[in-house]
Image (cartoon, rainbow, N blue to C red):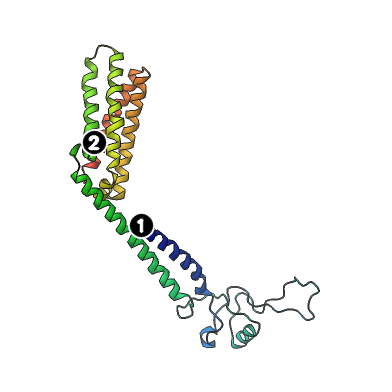
Amino acid sequence: MKLVGFLLITAALVLGVAVAPTAYLPSLDLPDEQLIGLTLNSSAGERMPDPPPTDPTAAGEPIANQNDELTAELLATLRAAGVERVRVKEFSFGRWSGKWLFVLAMLGLLGGAALVRLDNRTRLEAAKAAQAEAPAAESPAGALAAITDTIDGLRRDLPHMTTDHDREAAIVERLTDVQAVHVPAFVDGRERIISEQGLSGFAELMDRFAAMERQVNRAWSAAADGVYEEAADCLERAWFLAGETRAVLERA
């Protein structure tokens, strides 16, 4: 359904762009009373000089120039020269030959947008229903709680360990589980989050979550490299950002 919607939007845009310029290009087949008094916005027609130039590619003089006002005599001359349309400064819905095609393009845009929105709503509702049936630990809130509990546990246990090596090993071991299980579980719930908080709420939430995830990854890398002080600093920043992420998530 979404693909059909996007194809319909694309076709409508192409049609709209194609017919929009005709709004200021009235056909000279219209009655004189609809054209007399209009002001040209560009030159119209071409009159070859007498005698003709020797260069066959040479351009002739325009029959009418920009800012000229259309008169009955000028219209007759332009029609005799084979001019079908002229560009004018004034707009009139009645003179617009492509108006109904433009209206059709607008309806196509609205219809395509409606199909895309309907498809998105259907997907979000299905994702929300699936998440509701899933275990609480696999929901975004459950995944974030597991991440926060892991960080809290490290902050609580690290000061009681005897060596930096033991602390670094604990950080690597516990954060590996966070990276492999809980972070992907949170990201997999994005459609449920969007359905509850909208795109703007989702963007704000993922901004905080991504910042927290970067600190978790940096803490893991620093611990794996044997730099405990940096790992501990990153862990503290991750804990603070986890609180911010939870606050945004709980707004729903």
Q: In this view, does 53 lie to the left or right of 171?
A: right
Which residue appears at 40% of the width and 68% of the height?
106
Q: In which quarter of the image is residue 185?
A: top left
Mark 2, mark 1: which one is toward the viewer? 1
Q: Mark 1 points at which residue?
A: 2
Whole-Å distance between the Cαs marked 2 and 1? 30 Å
Q: What residue type is labelled 1?
A: Lys
Q: In this view, does 5 lie above or below 210?
A: below
- Work out whether residue 192 or residue 159 is closer to the camera in this orientation and state it: 192
Q: Residue 237 carries which label?
A: none
Is residue 156 placed above or below 142 in the rendered structure? above
Instruction: Read off the residue under disc 2.
Output: 143
Instruction: Give the x, y percent position of residue 231.
Output: 33, 22
Secondary structure under the numbered disc 1 in the rendered image: helix
Residue at coordinates 27% horizontally, 31% vertically from top-left?
A: 240
How far across and down, in percent of the image, does residue 209 sit? 30, 37
